[in-house]
Amino acid sequence: MVEQIRCGQPNEDARVELKAAWPNDAYKAARQIAAHANPAGGEPILWVIGVDQKGEVVGTGHNELA
C-alpha cells in the first residue's frame, strides 16, 4: 500500500483511509472508524496510520486508545 502511495497511485477509497496520526481522543477515533466501517457493509477496511494523504510517510507516536 505504501509503495503504491509513493508511486502516486490513488491511495484512498471507500475502504482505505490514510491518517498522519491517530485522533487524540479515543471517542473521536471510535466514531471515525465506525463512520468508515458502516458504508463498507461488513467488508474489511484499512487505516494506514503514519502516512498522510499526499503519500508522505510521517510516522506516528504511540497512542493508547484502550
Image: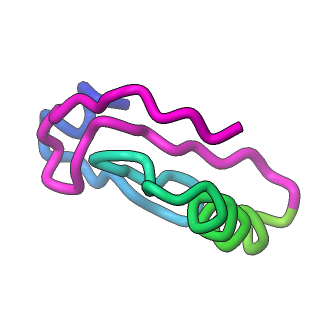
Location of residue 20 in the rendering, given as x and y in whole percent from the top left corner:
27, 47
Location of residue 63 in the rendering, given as x and y in whole percent from the top left corner:
47, 35
Q: Of residues 10 and 36, which is closer to you in this image?
A: 36
Residue 62 within the segment the image draws in magenta: yes
Left of 60 or right of it: where is 37? right
Quarter of image, res 37? bottom right
Q: Quadrant of the C terminus?
A: top right
- At a point 80% along the width and 51% down the height, the residue shown is 43
- At a point 22% along the width and 49% down the height, the residue shown is 52
Point out the residue furthest to the right here. 42
Location of residue 4 in the rendering, given as x and y in whole percent from the top left corner:
26, 34
Left of 27 or right of it: where is 52? left
Q: How many tags in the picture?
A: 0
Q: Main secondary structure of the magenta part?
A: loop
Q: Of residues 25 and 42, which is closer to you in this image?
A: 25
Quarter of image, res 49? top left
Left of 32 or right of it: where is 58? left
Q: Is residue 47 above or below residue 7?
A: below
Q: Quadrant of the N terminus?
A: top left
Give the colouring mode of the picture. Answer: rainbow
Give, as a single range, the part of the protein colored magenta: 42-66
- At a point 24% along the width and 25% down the height, the residue shown is 3
Location of residue 39 in the rendering, given as x and y in whole percent from the top left corner:
74, 74
- At a point 33% along the width and 46% down the height, the residue shown is 21
